[in-house]
């Protein structure tokens, strides 16, 4: 979008907003952005290249997309229908509901078997493997037995076993929160993250609390509560920085701190704040440089590689597709989980759509699907890209694209 096109677009947005009789602040609040972002859009400073942001603006202004951007792809009739509910975590959601050990509360006892600890550890490790692999149906089934077993264990075990049992519960709730975020079940993700934070504190794992806060922030982002996400992450970063400055940081401290910087980068990118986003990415790069390797502390997969993956994602969020593709060029994915590799390919697919390189976008999505089918089939951003590809292609959509659209319930 040229500077002249940005000014014309911004003037159109301002005219439509004034016709509705709303202020910049009111419209910005309605669409989950800041008044300063909207002001920059209306003045032609901030480009709006992403189709999903264009739709957001159009919805906020109460006009069809083509009124806001005449050359946008025409909506298909099916696009107006409600999006189907695709969720493999129904069993896990039921586990999260209510209390898993009511009988123990009514009849307190201490009948924990220490020899069951090895099995409980293995079950938590397995759940994180399923989470990283995007295998949500299997994850849900595993949760239905593992969570009640652990909840009962912390209520029936002698004190000497409680720190580890609380830590295992914290880890399992973090996995559950991460999975719910990926399937756009943000309310459940919030509950799971809150439980993870409590269990980590009971276990004595201070950094586990911060890891739970990271999961909580992801839930806030999904809920479009960007102010809550920013407030929560910024407070956590501030506390960690104070600690790191006066103490020798461990690799685990650096992993959590760097991940929280990346969380702030995501929030600022969603708000369209380029300078703030890049400051947080640079801060995460500095932390990753101190760390010096890719690690997986608290299942955060933080390290130099992950910082660049997130830099790709935030560049796409800002509509800077060229920058995203430049960062990704030559980026090695060795050792990353299949879920993380699929997420990178999904973001590259989004970048190619922004540059109208539709064949390249489809290729990225298909490669991502091979790595982690459930990530592509259930992730809201992936389905949005597929839907955009179908809308653009219209009747010329290839068999490969139509088949992918059917598998992701995105066929327009």
Image (spheres, rainbow, N blue to C red):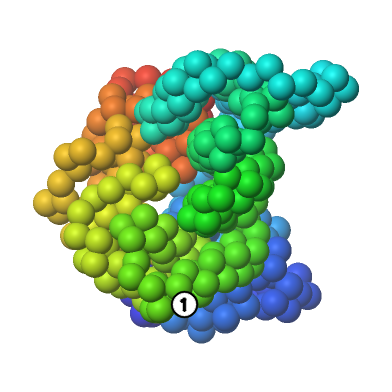
Q: Residue 78: tell me if it is visible.
A: yes
| Closer to the camera in the image, 170 or 222 | 170
Q: Quadrant of residue 396?
A: top left
- Residue 55: where, in percent of width, then height? 56, 54
Q: Residue 183: tell me if it is visible.
A: no
Element class at badge 1: helix
Above or below — where is 132 with respect to 313?
above
Q: Quadrant of residue 146?
A: top right
Residue that badge 1 annotates: 242
- Residue 149: where, in percent of width, then height? 63, 20
Q: Is residue 147 left or right of residue 357?
A: right
Above or below — where is 359 with respect to 103?
below
Q: Residue at x 64, y 40 (%)?
A: 192
Q: Residue at x 45, y 73 (%)?
A: 243
Residue at the outermost right position? 106
Q: Residue at x 35, y 35 (%)?
A: 339
| Closer to the camera in the image, 311 or 211 | 211
| Closer to the camera in the image, 314 or 102 | 102
Residue at the outermost bottom position? 43
- Residue 402: where, in percent of width, then height? 38, 23
Above or below — where is 145 with respect to 269?
above
């Amino acid at each position: 979008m040229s500077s002249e096109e940005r000014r014309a677009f911004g003037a159109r947005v301002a005219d439509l907003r004034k016709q509705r009789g709303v202020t910049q602040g009111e419209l910005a609040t309605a669409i989950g952005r800041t008044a300063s972002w909207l002001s920059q859009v209306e003045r032609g400073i901030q480009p709006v290249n992403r189709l999903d942001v264009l739709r957001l603006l159009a919805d906020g202004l109460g006009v069809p997309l083509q009124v806001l951007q005449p050359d946008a792809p025409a909506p298909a009739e099916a696009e107006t229908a409600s999006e189907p509910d695709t969720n493999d975590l129904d069993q896990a959601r039921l586990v999260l509901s209510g209390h898993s050990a009511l009988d123990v509360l009514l009849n307190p006892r201490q009948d924990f078997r220490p020899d069951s600890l090895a099995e409980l550890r293995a079950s938590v490790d397995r759940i994180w493997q399923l989470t990283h692999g995007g295998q949500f149906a299997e994850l849900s089934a595993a949760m239905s037995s593992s969570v009640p077993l652990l909840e009962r264990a912390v209520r029936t075990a002698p004190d000497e076993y409680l720190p580890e049992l609380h830590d295992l519960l914290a880890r399992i709730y973090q996995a559950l929160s991460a999975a719910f975020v990926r399937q756009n079940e943000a309310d459940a993700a919030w509950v799971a993250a809150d439980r993870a934070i409590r269990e980590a504190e009971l276990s004595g794992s201070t950094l586990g609390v911060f890891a739970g806060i990271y999961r909580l922030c992801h839930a806030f982002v999904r809920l479009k509560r960007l102010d809550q996400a920013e407030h929560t992450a910024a407070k956590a970063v501030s506390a960690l920085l104070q600690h790191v400055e006066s103490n020798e940081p461990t690799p685990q401290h650096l992993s959590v701190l760097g991940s929280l910087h990346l969380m702030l980068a995501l929030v600022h990118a969603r708000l369209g704040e380029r300078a703030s986003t890049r400051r947080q990415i640079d801060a995460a790069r500095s932390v990753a440089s101190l760390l010096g390797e890719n690690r997986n502390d608290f299942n955060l997969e933080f390290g130099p590689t992950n910082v660049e993956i997130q830099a790709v994602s935030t560049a796409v969020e800002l509509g800077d597709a060229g920058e995203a593709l430049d960062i990704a060029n030559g980026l090695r994915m060795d050792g990353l989980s299949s879920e993380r590799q699929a997420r990178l390919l999904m973001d590259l697919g989004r970048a190619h759509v922004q540059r109208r390189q539709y064949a390249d976008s489809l290729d990225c999505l298909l490669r991502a699907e091979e790595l982690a089918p459930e990530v592509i089939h259930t992730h809201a951003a992936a389905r949005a890209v597929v839907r955009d590809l179908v809308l653009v292609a219209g009747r010329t959509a290839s068999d490969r694209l139509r088949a992918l659209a059917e598998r992701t319930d995105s066929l327009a």
